[in-house]
Amino acid sequence: MYDNLTGEVGVFDFDEFANHLLEQGLEASPAELHGCLCGLLAAGAVPEPEVGLDGLGQALDLVLHGELADHTMQLYAITAAALEDEEFDFHPLLPDDSVDIVERTAALAVWCRGFLAGFAQVTGRADVPGAPLSEDSGEILKDFAAIAHATVDEDESEDEAEGSYIELLEYLRFAALNVYMDTQSRSDPRHLSSEQEPPLH
């Protein structure tokens, strides 16, 4: 995940991040952590690495140290760049496809919870007067709140569950980009032309 942007293979590997969190006695999922960072950025937080680290502490009560803190700040900066990428090369940090679909779906749900926590952390601050959410962004956040409870339907076949997961994942990618772009365009109308917006579907 994002390895080609960092030059350090494995820095943003899901399992490695999970191990670093466990080493610091933290039970948080890398998916929740990355979702929160994305939510901070989508709400208008500046892409300064320390801002991401502080935001995690305030939104998720995660206090990170040492190498994990350094990697998290890198992830925040790389995520900010990915959200700005004209090729829409943004991907949530989630387990790879070899992991059981139940676990991947749970991670997707946790990513959404993290996103909402990060977004609320920025928009809920009294010292940061922001423009009201657009109708589209408001609907996306409602969708994220619903996806935050996603589970695999026991009646679904494995292929159906995989299909549902892929559909949700693609929706998350472009929905998060749309919220980010909406916030940026409202803070600076020159930032984005309508032609640049990726389709949600």
Image (spheres, grey):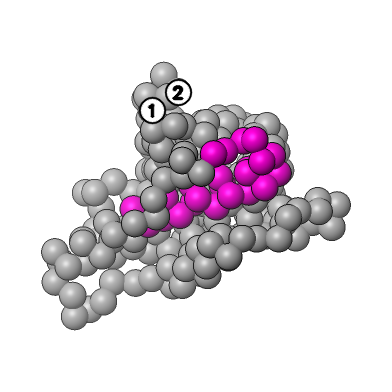
Q: Is residue 75 in view?
A: no
Labels 2 & 1 near each other (Cβ < 8 A): yes
Task: Report which residue position mark 1 lands on.
Answer: 3
Q: Amino acid at mark 1?
A: Asp
The image quadrant that residue 169 belongs to is bottom left
User: Is residue 99 found left or right of 143 in the rendered image?
Assistant: left
Quadrant holding the C terminus: bottom left
Residue 173, position in %: x, y? 41, 49
In the rendered image, residue 185 lying in the magenta stretch gets the answer yes
Residue 1, position in %: x, y? 37, 36
Name the residue at the top extreme. Answer: 7
- Answer few, some or many: residues within 10 Å of disc 1's Cα (few below 14, many 20 plus, some between 14 and 19): few
Q: In terms of secondary structure, where does tag 2 sit?
A: helix
Q: Amino acid at mark 2?
A: Thr
The image quadrant that residue 4 belongs to is top left
Residue 121, position in %: x, y? 70, 56
Distance in Å between CA atoms under marks 2 and 1: 5 Å
Residue 61, position in %: x, y? 67, 55
The residue drawn where x is 63% and y is 43% is 184
In the rendered image of this protein, does residue 25 appear above or below residue 138?
Answer: above
Task: Report which residue position mark 2 lands on.
Answer: 6
